[in-house]
Amino acid sequence: MSRVVGKVGYGIFPAGPKTRASGLSADALGIPAKCTNKMPAWLYLQWACGRAMMTRQLVGGYGAPPRKSAFEVAKTDPGPKLSLAWLDCVINSAGYARPILPQIVAVTEFRDVFGSALTNMIGGADPANELKKATETFAPILEKSEKT
């Protein structure tokens, strides 16, 4: 049994000194160029990404799908696993959402370098020092990747 049920609140990100933004990430599905059964793959994608399945994902509490129509349906029939407070926050944040990861070629290396820094900070390391080291480590990677 969860110890946090009923003790969690939700709110939209406040505006900062320069902008207001919330994190946005998404998964993607596609059909490989060398696929030999493109029609069944296409039909699967239509099913998996259709309004019914995206609404089921949202109402089931499995994440926030990219279909606006799923949110409209969920507002009228949220089901037992979906918090209406959370749903309102997601809907209200969508207008100023920005990609959660930097839009750079070396995003995997960024995750590795800054992820290690975050792990160290969680373990008690000084945040300013960790971020400085991560920035110094990542700067040449970014510079090289932007030239290609």
Image: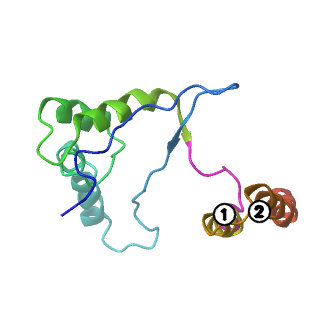
Residue placed most toward the observer, 19 or 7: 7
Identify the image quadrant of the C terminus. bottom right
Neighbour tally class for label 2: few under 14, some 14-19, many 20 plus, Cα within 10 Å = some
> What is the CA distance from the residue labelled 2 to the residue labelled 1?
7 Å
What residue is at 83 percent from the left and 58 percent from the top? 132
106 drawn magenta: yes
Q: How many marks?
A: 2
Left or right: 95 as drawn, with respect to 82: right
Q: Which residue is mark 2?
A: 130
Residue ID at (66%, 49%): 103
Q: Could you say which quadrant of the image residue 18 lies in?
A: top right
Badges 2 and 1: C-beta atoms under 8 Å apart?
Answer: yes
> At which x and y percent is residue 147?
86, 58
Looking at the rendering, the stretch of residues picked out in magenta corresponds to 99-109
Who's the residue at 39% across and 59% down the image? 29
Q: Residue 84 versus residue 100: which sits nearer the camera?
A: 84
Local SS, label 1 = helix
Considering only order in the chain, which callout, 1 or 2, is on the residue closer to the N terminus?
A: 1
> Where in the figure is residue 74, as x and y percent of width and height?
19, 36
Q: Residues within 10 Å of mark 1 (few under 14, many from 20)?
A: some
Is 62 located above or below residue 24 in the figure?
below
In the figure, 50 relative to 44: above or below? above
Colour theme: rainbow
Seen in the picture, residue 39 relative to 77 is either above or below; the reply is below
Magenta stretch, main secondary structure, is loop
Name the residue rendered at 36%, 37% in the picture. Answer: 10
5 relative position to 89: left or right:
left
Type of amino acid under label 1: Met
Circle 1 sits on which residue? 121
